[in-house]
Amino acid sequence: METLSGLAGGMGVALSPFNLFVGFIGAVVGTAVGVLPGLGPTATVSLLLPLSAMLDPASAIILLAGIYYGAMYGGSLTSILMRVPGEAASVVTCLDGYAMARQGRAGVALGISAFGSFFAGIAATLGIALLGPTFAETALAFGPVEKAALVLFGLTMVAGIGDGPSMRAWAMIGLGLLLAAVGVDLVSGDERYTFGMPQLRDGFNIAVLAMGVFGMSEVLVAAEKIQPPAPIAAVGRRLKDLLPNRHDWKASAGPIARGSGLGFLLGLLPGGGALIASFASYLLEKRLSSHPEHFGKGAIEGVAGPESANNAAAQASFIPLLCLGIPSNAVIGVIMGALLMQGVTPGPRLVADHPELFWSVVASMFVGNVMLVILNVPLVRIFVMLLRVPPAYMTPFILLFCVIGAFSINNSLFDVAAMIAFGFLGYGLRRGGFDLAPLVLAFLLGTLLEQNTRQALIIGLGSPTVFFYSPISLGFLAATILMLSLPAMRRLMLIVR
């Protein structure tokens, strides 16, 4: 009853004309940020901090939160239409979303992405309202030791995400980990693989890498073809012909539900968030599918699950912030700074001391998700029309999009050059029959693995036995060993037979 009364009061705040306008601006800006590769919600939220200081606390958080989960919606657009991930969490969407677009099913992919994100957002918001403070306590059980074991287990799963022989996938994982090591050592401060170039002290940016190996390599592959590329399958002109049909909904219902639940749980963990949630959802759906060979070739489950997971995780990450005062990722850290600027200290006392703020943020998430699906679904027809642009015009546009996105990260031509270099690397690897997804995902997980492993070893005074004292860590290590031994066990069973 207390939850309902609090939510009713929050709705009164969120539905005020000014806060509706603020939420709408946040949703629109967030969608635009998700579409533009390289900019990202972290930079945008940081730029808008001075503006948020001029608003009251509830309006400020409604604006910044709308940008964050709006970016999760927008990031799928270029991933599906151009194979250029607009946001890091949309990297996985490139795998099947772009394949669906080439099959004339771009509208279905965009539609299921928007509806999946909407249902996941509503489910996550209900979870925040009903179970948030209770579930948030689980985040406290995940320290550096547990997170290092979790990421290590994730790396063993990455090998199963792409096509081709597993040894090639492991080669890509090794290359991804090597690229993640570029920069300054976290403990000693020594430079690694920078070759004296100050631009590499901070390492490579994930947006630069993803735009290069996915977007730029696609341009090079298209330019290589002497014959015109295979035409995209014909698509309908009416909106109802472009949206998911009954069969698509039947195939997507399970992935959306599982992605929403998985994303919500992973969003509670510091360092988890939308990126790991989308990756984990894709792996889960591929493992559960009776036709895993369809993944990477246009499986709608490969879009529905990850897109639902990343949006659920983005909204669930507000629970540790509001209820425990723990920022789950960089964007939430900036939003925490906005709260502190307003004189509000997030933590266990927030609900008691500022109930109107807590419940207005929760209510605004319901309103924001409705706004986003209303904004995105009618535009599907316009987005699909981009696929009718001849490749001779679209390819240079994709290249320009990648160059602008790379330059906008740090206003640096070095990032543009790095993106082009990664494009040629991706092109060469694709020609050699290597799948690029394990490379990008290993790069993302490599930084998390190093950070948490180094912190865990410091806690354990340099002894690796620290990983065996935690039941959670021990469980993940056992699962890792099991996953690594499965191929050998299968071969042994074939020999015995």
Image (tube, rainbow, N blue to C red):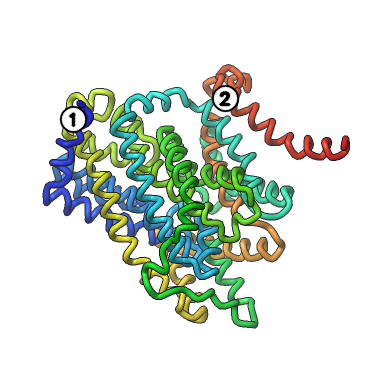
Which residue is depicted at the point 60% across and 54% down?
Answer: 295
**Circle 1 sits in a helix, a strand or a loop, which is it?**
helix
Give percent across and percent down for residue 473. 57, 24
Image quadrant in which you'd find residue 433? bottom right
Image quadrant in which you'd find residue 360? top left
**Which residue, as the protein is rendered here, is positioned at the far front?**
246
Q: Does residue 449 show up?
A: yes
Left or right: residue 372 versus residue 15 is right
Give percent across and percent down for residue 190. 55, 39
Which residue is depicted at the point 20% across and 26% down?
Answer: 2
Inter-mark Cα distance, 2 to 1: 36 Å
Left or right: residue 436 versus residue 6 is right
Left or right: residue 241 versus residue 55 is right
Image quadrant in which you'd find residue 338? top left
Q: Which mark is residue 377?
A: none
Which residue position holds label 2?
473
